[in-house]
Image (cartoon, rainbow, N blue to C red):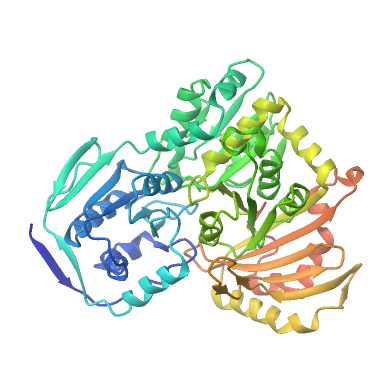
Amino acid sequence: MNVHTVSTQPFSDQKPGTSGLRKQVPVFQQRHYLENFIQSIFNSLDDYRGKTLVLGGDGRYYNRTAIQTILKMAAANGVGRVLVGLGGILSTPAASCLIRKNQAFGGIILSASHNPGGPKGDFGVKFNTSNGGPAPEKVTSAIYETSKTLEGYQIIEAPDIDLDTLSIVQLGETTVEVIDPVADYADLMQSLFDFDRIRDFIKSGRFRMSFDALHAVTGPYAKALFEERLGAGEGTVQNGTPLEDFGGGHPDPNLVYAHDLVELLFGDNAPDFGAASDGDGDRNMILGRNFFVTPSDSLAVLAANATLVPGYQDGLAGVARSMPTSAAVDRVAEKLGIDCYETPTGWKFFGNLLDAGKATLCGEESFGTGSNHVREKDGLWAVLFWLNILAVREQSVEDIVREHWKTYGRNYYSRHDYEAVDKDNATTLMENLRSKLDSMPGQTFGNYQVKYADDFSYTDPVDGSISKNQGVRIGFTDGSRIVFRLSGTGTQGATLRLYLESYEPDASQHQTETQAALADFIDIAEEVAQIRKYTGMDKPTVIT
């Protein structure tokens, strides 16, 4: 095996965000750029030589090229075995499943999640640790620090591996296994959910569903699960072939970008149930006939009905949500007598809680839900959870959610995204907000008095680590709140996220349209932050 050490210069922009390093494809195509970051991962780790690495991605443009490079670098750096998905395909939750099942030292996942793909689109590299979850901040910080002083990388000289044939081949001293990317994950799902009951329900003739894979990674998984194992009719899975540019679409399962599914579920003769997932398969959107389930409500409904599902029939140890996610699940936890944890945004913050047995279900308002079965959010898992509940309760999606509101009250909730905002303007907006926080408590805006105003800080209850500046919160005495946060998942400009929440316990007031119910808080947010001025936009890019 000929191992080459290639001299290189550091790049200054390789600091991973909340979900790894994300840049536009041409950035990763720069000479040495990908190699530098991969070598920084290996250099920052201890005790991985001779052990197993999981590798795959969501099939977006540059996925195959990057995999060939990483395989040769893994061999040069002494990795013992690499498991790579057939065709380079591996969903993020499936990668987590494989890391845990094979006791791998980690995994490299190639994805920019819900961001667009193609030659001018986005690409990403994320390292997951041995528990199957995203690398915590201490690991990503070590990778970044290594990248700033890197002088070279190791790579072997070898022909490319055939990624389109199940095989076991040697790459120098490293064994490369091209594996079925679906089988182990599908088996895990079947161990958690009552597939017999769901199959009978689907085939009863009383229920129709549609799943939109958005030409992203979940197509093969959804076909295997819904159409093959559960007996849903052929064509239940729409846009099921992963494409390098996601068919020119935006693989983000929300009301704007999954518009074909939304039109179907809100159209004539709509199916009973609709769902979609994103680029790498870790997000989900749930729809009933003429009814949208917010991710915050979805988490709360799953928690309230968990014992109906075999994998969770003994109850939940606790639940966790990201800070911007609505408090709907908090009310379920209170009734169940279990703990509810509020964390910063980023799935890695749930990892310690799951590993310590403090939480069983976790969720984020950004269409991410999951449990302790893996260490990633999991789009198809959430869809199967809903199908299991529907099969047991034999009610519509809307009836289940409205009954939930009657029991727990309704948290009116919405997120307004302002995308591709000038970074300097977005930073100024947040700095101005922070400068006002100390003087806000006690102030009145319209009919609402500010109870607290802060920049969210989190102390991990397991390891004591502290994460500061996680989002500006303005809470009112009636339990309503406004949250401002800059997202770390985009590659162009900045994305300002505005979160609005108002609690309504009175069931007779649960019919109000969401934006109307939150209108006062939308106005307050504009008054406090001057959103139009700093974003240059009259309205959000996306409202969910």
Rendering coords of residue 203 (x, y %): 58, 17
196 over 474 or under it: above or below = above
Rendering coords of residue 111 (x, y %): 41, 53
- Looking at the image, the residue that sits furthest to the left is 2
Residue 211 or residue 260, whichever sits in front: 211
124 over 401 or under it: above or below = below
Rendering coords of residue 403 (x, y %): 80, 37
> What residue sits 45% from the left and 23% below the top?
228
Question: How many marks can you see?
Answer: 0
- Asked whether residue 406 appears in the rendered view, the answer is yes
Rendering coords of residue 1 (x, y %): 8, 57
- Asked whether residue 271 appears in the rendered view, the answer is no
305 relative position to 247: left or right: right
243 over 544 or under it: above or below = above
Residue 539 or residue 202, whichever sits in front: 202
> What residue sits 48% from the left and 47% below the top?
374
207 over 318 or under it: above or below = above
> What residue sits 60% from the left and 36% below the top?
385
Give residue 407's quadrant in the image.
top right
> What residue sits 66% from the left and 72% below the top?
456
179 relative position to 383: left or right: left
2 relative position to 388: left or right: left
